Amino acid sequence: MGSHQYSTEIKEGSNVFDVMSQIKEENKNDFDFEYNEYPYLGIFINGINGAVGSPGAYWIYYVNDKEASVGVSNYIINEGDIINWKQE
């Protein structure tokens, strides 16, 4: 699977999930994702652009090349942050 890059203007205080939802809603690209929301745990991304995690592999996100330590609904994006998703 090739890599894709998306960018958008964000509102202050937006988390990763907010921005992913915003990019999906803009409809000017082919971005799509699937997720589940679990009580007490938050949102987990299951698939991006049709690629779902294979057994034992999960979608993990990185912020400025460092593995994130909180879930997508908890990381507030700062100006200039680069979010990368990898299946690991």
Image: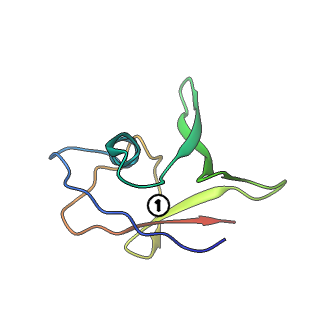
Quadrant location of the N terminus in the rendered image: bottom right
Could you say where residue 80 lies in the image, as x and y percent from the top left? 22, 69
Identify the residue at horizontal 40%, vertical 48% (top origin).
20
Label 1: how many Cα within 10 Å (few below 14, some 14–19, many 20+): some
Judging depth in this view, the residue of 39 and 86 nearest the camera is 86
Residue 65 is left or right of residue 37, and the answer is left
Judging depth in this view, the residue of 22 and 37 nearest the camera is 22
Could you say where residue 50 lies in the image, as x and y percent from the top left? 65, 51
Could you say where residue 36 lies in the image, as x and y percent from the top left? 60, 32
Residue 14 is left or right of residue 41, and the answer is left
In the displayed orientation, state which residue is furthest to the top.
Answer: 39
Label 1, on which residue?
68
Type of amino acid at the residue the image marks with label 1: Ala
Could you say where residue 39 lies in the image, as x and y percent from the top left? 56, 23
The quarter of the displayed image where residue 26 is located: top left
Colour convention of the picture: rainbow
Q: Is residue 56 above or below residue 45?
A: below
The quarter of the displayed image where residue 5 is located: bottom left
Judging depth in this view, the residue of 61 and 66 nearest the camera is 61
Quadrant location of the C terminus in the rendered image: bottom right
In the displayed orientation, state which residue is furthest to the right.
Answer: 55
Residue 16 is left or right of residue 88, and the answer is left
Identify the residue at horizontal 47%, vertical 57% (top origin).
69
Q: Is residue 36 above or below residue 81?
A: above
Identify the residue at horizontal 16%, vertical 45% (top origin).
11
In the displayed orientation, state which residue is furthest to the left.
Answer: 12
SS state under label 1 = loop
- Number of marks present in the image shown: 1
